[in-house]
Image (cartoon, rainbow, N blue to C red):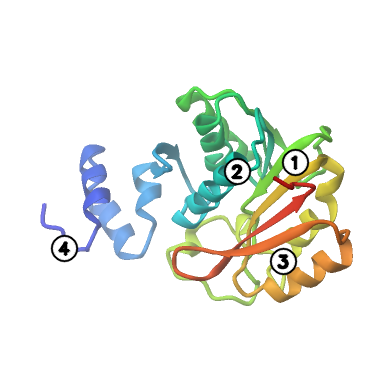
Amino acid sequence: MNNKINIPPRELKELEKINGLTKENIEKIKNDYPIQYIIGYTNFYGLDIKVNENVLIPRYETEYLVEKLLKYIKDYKINNPKILDLCTGSGCIGLTLKHELPTSKITMADISQKAIEVAKENKTSLKLEVDIIESDLFKNITDKDFDIIISNPPYVMTKETLPKNVQYEPSIALFSGEQGIEHTEKIIKEYKSYTKERSILALEINEQSEPTITEIIKNNLEKKITYKFEKDLTGRTRYLFIFRNMEK
């Protein structure tokens, strides 16, 4: 079929595979409806992750967060890590970490029951043993001894105008107050109660929030912790890593 609507070759192949090039779907795509939702899954770190309108579509920025964390786990020699993935959505982060670190113990949590259902389907299809619970951030988290907490929380400012294709994704997973930091701030303030003395917090953040987040860290965490902001592949500040007692 002539690729008149500029569908990327990989997505076009997947659409053809599922007989998804219907007139209805082509009209959706013309209206910037995410192709991944039509296909029903997307590739993340080599895994096929099911997605629908109840979860964010995993992006390369989040793949890079996982890649960076895996390197820190190796560098700091954290064996058999116990990891909490907050705001898990489709489960792409937690499931990838379990796939890459088979001896790890992974707990994945999300406030959305519909997102939890998607994460459970991905757990089943990928045959990965993880725990999945419904929780508004730390509300239903009972374990206090995680080595690592990782999260891609909502971080879009409520005043931001999003591209049309992103507007189809769940707002509960996107927006986090006027400054885009409400979830990030809560995680930073509370995470120590759920981790070991030697731990890592890894967050994907709003690129505009570095100064505000820096103040939150200085006002709420002891001076002995170290932290660093890191950039994504486009050069935008996208990640925050906080290290407690993580001397090599």
Q: Nearer the viewer, mark 4 or mark 2?
A: 2
- Image quarter (top left, top right, bottom left or bottom right) of the C terminus: top right
Q: Amino acid at mark 1?
A: Ser
Lower sequence index among marks 1 and 4: 4
Closest to the observer, 37 or 74? 74
Q: Can you name the residue that lies furthest to the front here?
A: 248
Callout 2: helix, strand or loop? helix
Label at residue 75: 2
How far across and how far down the image is residue 121, in percent?
51, 30
SS at badge 3: loop
How far across and how far down the image is residue 73, in percent?
Answer: 61, 41
Real-space Cα distance between discs 3 and 1? 19 Å
Q: Which of the marked residues, 3 or 1, is nearer the chain's N terminus?
A: 1
Nearest the eye: 172 or 196:
196
Q: Which of labels 3 and 1 is toward the front?
A: 3
- Measured as percent of width and height from the top left, residue 122 is found at 50, 32
Residue 79 disc label: none
Q: Are marks 1 and 4 in contact (CB under 8 Å)?
A: no
Specify which label sits upstream in the sequence, 2 or 1. 2
Distance between the alpha carbons at the discs numbered 4 and 2? 47 Å
Q: Tell me if mark 2 has few (under 14), some (14-19) or many (20+) residues whose alpha carbon lies within 10 angstroms of its own.
A: few
Q: CA distance from mark 3 to mark 2?
A: 29 Å
Residue position marked by numbered label 4 in the rendering: 4
Q: Is residue 126 left or right of residue 217?
A: left
Instruction: Give the labeled residue for mark 1.
Output: 135
Q: Which residue is mark 3?
A: 181
Answer few, some or many: residues within 10 Å of disc 3's Cα (few below 14, many 20 plus, some between 14 and 19): many
